[in-house]
Structure formats: C-alpha cells, structure tokens
Image (spheres, rainbow, N blue to C red):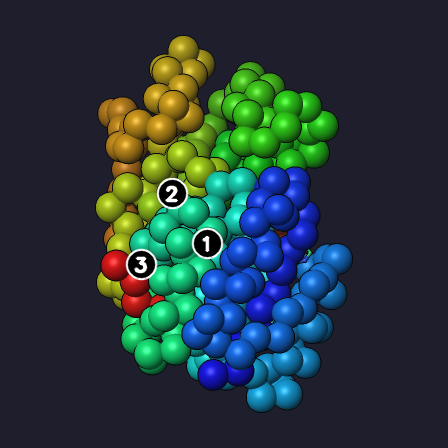
Amino acid sequence: MNVAVVVNPSAASGRFRHRLPQVLSTLERRLRIEVLTTRSSADAVAACERALDGGAQALVAIGGDGTFHTALHALDGRDVPFALIPAGTCNDMADALGLPADPVAAAAAAAESLADGNVQQVDLAEVVYPDGRTLRFGTVLAIGYAASVADRGGRLKWPAGPRRYDVAALLELPRFRGRVYDVTLDGVAAQLPAVLFSVGNTGRCGGKLHVCPDADIADGYLDVTTQGPNSLPATLGSTMRLFSGVRSATDTSTRRFRVREIHVASAGHVTFADGEPLPPPPFTVHCAAGALTVPKVG
Ligand SMILES: Nc1ncnc2c1ncn2[C@@H]1O[C@H](COP(=O)(O)OP(=O)(O)OP(=O)(O)O)[C@@H](O)[C@H]1O
C-alpha cells in the first residue's frame, strides 16, 4: 500500500522529533511510504493534496490535533484511510481513536491495521457558514472561555508545553461572566447562558478537559455541553476541577444535549476546534456520521 506521511516538525515544539526515524521505520515495515516534510499548515495541505491526487492510497499524519485538523482539509471529504500518529502536545484526537500514546507503538498499530485493511468509520463534525463554506473538525469545538484560553495559551511564550494553558486559564478567568447564546438544537430554538460552551464529536479538549465526557466518536451525534454562568468563586471552582482533569466536572449549571445538528446564531465569539482557530459564528455544526476511515486498533 502506497501511503503519504505528513510530518509536522513543530508539533509539541519538536519534542518528538528525535523519535521520527523510529516512527518512520516502523511504518515502513508494513507500508510503502512517501514522507512529506512541511513548514506550515498551508504547505501541508498542498503537499497532501498532491500526494493523494498522485495516487496515495492512505494518509498518515504525525503530530498533534492541529496536524490532524490540517490533514482533514487535505482529505476534503475523500474516502481515503487516514491514520494519526500522536506527536503533539495534547493529542486529543489520537486518544479518542484509541491509539497508544507512544508514537512508535501507535505507528506499529496503525501500519498493521492499514496494511491488513482493518479499518473502521468514525464521525467528524462539519461547520457550515452562511456563505456555504464548510470546515471539518474531529474533537471539540469550543466557544467562550475555553476558546479564549486556547487563543491566549497559544500566544504565551512562557511556560513551555501544556502548562501554558493553565496559566492562560487563570489569566482569562476574571474576564468571563458568561454570555447568552442563541442556538437551535435539532430544530428547537433555545437561549443558553454559558461560560463554557462546547460541541463535542469526542469528549476531551486541551489534553485534559473532559468537556463532553459521554461523547462517542461513532454514534452519529454531537454532544453539546454548556456550563455556567455562576458566581466567580463557583466558576473558578468548576473550572479548576475541569483543568485538574476531573472526568466529569459538573455543577448545577452544567447542561448537556445530544444532537445531530446545532445552529449557533450569536455572532462574533472566539471559536476554536481541534485546538485551531475557526471563523466565529453564526454557523451550523452537524455530525458527518462515518465520514472518516481510520485504522481499527486494540
Ligand atoms: N503538517 C504541518 N506542518 C507544519 N505545521 C503544521 C502542520 N500541520 C499543522 N501545522 C501547524 O503547527 C501547529 C502545531 O501543530 P499541532 O497542533 O499538531 O501540535 P501541538 O499544538 O503540539 O499539539 P496539540 O494540538 O495536540 O496540542 C498547528 O497549530 C498548525 O498551525
């Protein structure tokens, strides 16, 4: 099987770069690989598209959630098996796919499944803007507080690694009192007051925030969680529980919905999906059931 392998050398600030030769040789044991080394997302999309147009039968991406997100652009709905090798900071998508956290172990599992045709279909989420533009994501779309934390954390120079986001969470907290979001959930209009607003194809974002803890990547549904608003101490408490990795950081203000589609009418909020910035609402998010073919592992 001919496989294009896109490598993001900047994922996790290069922390896994020394493991790359071993990851590639592990893939090569079962697959014929063409390695695409890229400097930017745009570079990666173009290189992947060229490789897929040129006959690559599968795509492997080595990096984190942003690398995964970029690979989705390149796939652009093509029904080509895709494997993600976790080499990023948070690796939420790789975790949701059940891949081993170690990149070499993940490469071995993915290569074996791809070579044997042992694949499965999982869901993606599709964000449709009023002008018809459509973007896809795999993990969680965050609006409000978590999106602002992702935004600020990504811009902080210190500390290195995931700790940046803990610092950003504290810095952003005083600014947040909650907002009311105008939404339509499977055709039913609602106004949802929230500090944290998450639309999950999977359960986790930011490496440890289990914002949609019951989400299932293959059920054909999206899980929507809203949390808050509360008093500042209560918001601080529930946020700290969430940031400490508690699996289900609920409080009395947490509301959960399971839908096929959500329309967010409230305009202009900072939005992130797969840890990457997305144009703000208004938009409609719907579940693209079974839209991604991935190796079956475990
Ligand atoms: N193939 C690529 N080559 C170069 N840069 C890329 C590529 N894919 C994505 N990028 C850029 O690199 C940035 C970091 O990549 P990525 O998100 O995968 O790593 P991370 O932030 O360490 O991991 P995570 O998102 O899991 O926390 C992305 O925000 C994106 O802009």
Quarter assignment of residue 250: top left
Residues packed near mark 1 inside 10 Å, few (<14), some (14 to 19) or many (20 plus) = many
**Any mark on residue 204, and which?**
2
Q: How far apart are marks 1 and 3 (CA)?
A: 24 Å
Front of the two marks 1 and 2:
1
Q: Which residue is drawn at 54% across and 56% down?
A: 22
* Residue at the disc numbered 3: 217
> Residue 165: which numbered mark, if any?
none
- Picture quarter containing residue 69? bottom right
What x and y, as percent, mark residue 148?
A: 58, 34
Q: In this rendering, is residue 247 above or below 278?
A: above
> Residue 216: x percent and y percent?
27, 55
Is there any visible trace of residue 217 in the rendered image? yes
Q: Does the residue labelled 2 lie within 8 Å of ligand 1?
A: no
Rendered view: 175 above or below 86: above
**Tag 1: residue type?**
Val
User: Which of the marked residues, 1 or 2, is nearer the chain's N terminus?
Assistant: 1
Residue drawn at x 31%, y 58% is: 217
Q: Position of residue 24 (x, y in %)?
A: 55, 63
Q: Residue 104 carries which label?
A: 1
**217 or 133, which is in the foreground?**
217
